[in-house]
Structures are given as C-alpha cells and as structure tokens.
Amino acid sequence: MTNSRTAFFVSDRTGITAENLGHSLLSQFDSIKFKLIRLPFLDTLEKARDAMVQINDTALADGQRPLVFSTLIIPAVRNIVEQSDSLFLDLFEMFIVPLETELGINSSHAVGRSHGADINYNSRMDAVNYAMNHDDGGITKELDRADIILIGVSRCGKTPTSLYLALQNGIYAANYPLVPEDFESGSLPKALKPLLKKLHGLTIRPERLQKIRTERSPNSRYASLENCQLEVKQAENMMQQSHIPFLDVTTMSVEEIATTIMHQTGLKH
C-alpha cells in the first residue's frame, strides 16, 4: 500500500470549510503523507473543467486517483468535477440531504451562505486587529481589554494561537513573551502583574523548541538545546510561582491549543 496520496479541496467559495473538514478526516490516517491542494472559487463551467483536467492529470502522474473533498453548491459545476478520476466526496450532500429530510424543507443551496450567516464577522475582525497589535508584547496600551493574555518563551506558539482565537472565535487575545531579562529579575514583566487573572501560559518540550528556533536562527545560542532547556524550565517555574495555569503544546495543533484553552478558561465566542 502506498504511503502518499493527493487530496483536493474544491469549493465555489474559499474552500476553507472543505479543507477544515477534510483535514480532520485525513488526520485519522497518520501513516499516509498527503499532498494537499485547495481549488477555491470554482463558480463557472470553465473553471470546473480546468479543475477536472488538473485532477485527472494528478491521477495519471500519481498512478492512483486523488481524493476530492467538495463543498460545491452549483449543480452544473459539481457534476463536471464529480466526473473526474477521483474519489469524490460531496461534504454538503452527506449532511444537507439528511437535514432536509429531518427538517421537512429544502435547503437554499446558496453559494457563500456560511459567510453571510456570520453576524459576528465584524467583531471577529476587530479581535484579529487587536491580536495583531498586541503581538509579542509590542504594545501594552489597552492590554487590559484582552480576554486572555498568552505568555511563554519565544516560539512556543503564542502568536498563531492568539490569531486563531481571534479569527475563529472573536476572542481578544494578546500575547507576551517571557525573555531572559524577566528570568534574571525573577518576576513577571511589569505590564502583566496587574492582569494576573487574564494570563495563561504555553510551554513546550525543549527538543521541539530547539527544532523550531533552529529554522529561524540556525547555529545560534538562542536555538541551542541547552538554552531552550534553561528558558523552558525558568518560564515554567515563574508561571508556577505566580499560580498561572499553563499548557504543554508540544504535540498539539493550533486548533487543539485554542479549543483546550477556551475549555479550561471558560471563554465563550
């Protein structure tokens, strides 16, 4: 059995829904390496035919049919892509038909309806702007507006988690790094002390941290295993002394980190 497959995520809009659900399903097959390709905005017959050609060419090159995760709504477009040499998985068909049966009405089959139904879109965008402005302790003004402030050593995942919390859930998330100067002083940064109840720590195994930092700054003391071990230990000690809850994110995705934090803290989107 091959350990490599190609997966397409196709949609008449951004393809994010197809990709998110597809990722969740493919993650159950960790022995296979997937090449992932998103084909968004397939909203004309010409684009659908081009997509079918690309999928068929991939099947020929790979020697096996790709997986196609679809949230295509336009019937004519969907019918073309469905004829490709692939395992075509219509994610909407799997759920919409049973829902129509249960609810006793037909769905609208409208393109882009998921975005239009998001009445919290503007608030989520405000939260994203806040997260970007309060990344890595760059701005301490209005830090008290944060729903949560993530702290931890450099490169432990604070920034992507803050942005995910903002974009997906409208959480006002700031993040603040713990640096050697803080460890030398033996106390939290001055800006964080009045906001102790909003703090939540992230930690990571030193070996994993070394790999991440090496990609950014190879052959540096910053990325050395010895320094990573020291910083992680000092950061965990500081958080324990201040009674700040923290989460080991070594083996967790950003989605898992954000969901776990929301569950642990009771934050609501």
Image: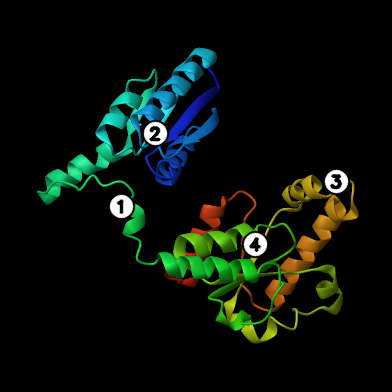
The residue type indicated by label 2 comes to: Phe
* Residue 167 x %, y %: 50, 61
Which element carries disc 4, helix, strand or loop?
A: helix
Q: Name which quarter of the figure residue 239 lies in.
A: bottom right
Instruction: Kindly report the distance in space between the C-alpha atoms of the residues bearing marks 3 and 4.
Output: 21 Å
The tag on residue 218 is 3
State whether residue 248 appears in this view: no
- What is the quadrant of residue 85 in the picture? top left
Q: Badge 1, how many Cα within 10 Å: few under 14, some, many 20+? A: few
Q: Nearer the viewer, mark 4 or mark 1?
A: 1
Q: Which residue is mark 2?
A: 69
Q: Residue at x 49, y 38 (%)?
A: 27
Image disc number at residue 184: none
Query: Mark 2–mark 1 contact, CB under 8 Å?
Result: no
- Which element carries disc 1, helix, strand or loop? helix
Query: Please, what secondary structure does the residue beneath circle 3 have?
Result: loop
Q: Is residue 188 above or below residue 97?
A: below
User: Do tag 4 and tag 2 residues touch (Cβ < 8 Å)?
Assistant: no
